[in-house]
């Protein structure tokens, strides 16, 4: 087993190139890695034919087909609804006063354990599936407002 320090020395410390295992995409990549490690041979090699089979199954599971043209696949995936993360400030005392701060493409994991109270507003965030940022904003706004009643 290689220590983290040895691994970092050999592979670099650029955290921007690392995946976030807590993101939706990161979890899918970790799942692929687990599948490949499951077929690993005792000498540490991965059998080529089995790797191809695993990759074909994995690519299909994330919306790609091995025979797809890459540009057409990207265009097809862009036209489908996908995850958006919407963040805002909700006034818990005044209905209809939620302020949308930002809409981000993708599902962003949030580690904010203290939503706080900023001048009477509470920080809120939701991940929604929508066709575009405008639809994502509307869906999240409805969720933010509905949560006020809980």
Image (cartoon, rainbow, N blue to C red):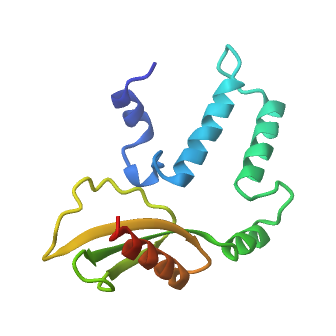
Q: Residue at x 51, y 85 (%)?
A: 134
Placement of 29 over or under 130, stated as above or below: above
Placement of 135 over or under 109, stated as above or below: below
> For the C terminus, which image quadrant?
bottom left
Please state the horizontal and vertical placement of residue 91, each as a whole percent of the image. Answer: 24, 78
Q: How many marks?
A: 0
Q: Is residue 119 left or right of residue 54?
A: left
The foreground one among 126 and 45 is 126
Placement of 84 over or under 47, stated as above or below: below
Q: Is residue 150 left or right of residue 69?
A: left
Q: Is residue 66 left or right of residue 121?
A: right
Please state the horizontal and vertical placement of residue 75, each as a whole percent of the image. Answer: 72, 75
Placement of 54 over or under 82, stated as above or below: above
Q: Residue at x 82, y 66 (%)?
A: 69
Q: Residue at x 22, y 78 (%)?
A: 93
Q: Most extreme residue toward the left, as rendered?
A: 119
The foreground one among 106 and 117 is 117
Q: Most extreme residue toward the right, as rendered?
A: 67
Please state the horizontal and vertical placement of residue 100, each as a whole percent of the image. Answer: 35, 81
The foreground one among 80 and 147 is 147
Q: Most extreme residue toward the top, as rendered?
A: 42
Q: Residue at x 40, y 72 (%)?
A: 146
Answer with the quarter of the image where residue 77 lies: bottom right
Answer with the quarter of the image where residue 79 lies: bottom right
Q: Most extreme residue toward the front, as rendered?
A: 149
Q: Is residue 5 left or right of residue 20?
A: left
Please state the horizontal and vertical placement of residue 15, each as a whole percent of the image. Answer: 38, 50
């Amino acid at each position: 087993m290689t220590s983290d320090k040895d691994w970092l020395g050999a592979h670099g410390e650029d955290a921007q190139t690392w995946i976030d295992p807590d993101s939706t995409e990161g979890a899918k990549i970790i799942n692929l890695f687990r599948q490949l490690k499951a077929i690993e041979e005792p000498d540490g090699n991965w059998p080529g034919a089995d790797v191809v089979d695993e990759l074909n199954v994995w690519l299909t599971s994330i919306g790609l087909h091995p025979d797809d043209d890459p540009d057409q696949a990207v265009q097809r995936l862009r036209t489908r609804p996908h995850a958006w993360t919407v963040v805002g400030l909700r006034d818990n005392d005044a209905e209809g006063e939620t302020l949308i701060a930002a809409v981000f493409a993708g599902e962003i994991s949030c580690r904010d354990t203290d939503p706080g109270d900023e001048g009477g507003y509470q920080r809120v965030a939701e991940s929604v599936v929508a066709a575009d940022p405008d639809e994502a904003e509307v869906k999240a706004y409805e969720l933010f407002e509905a949560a006020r009643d809980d």
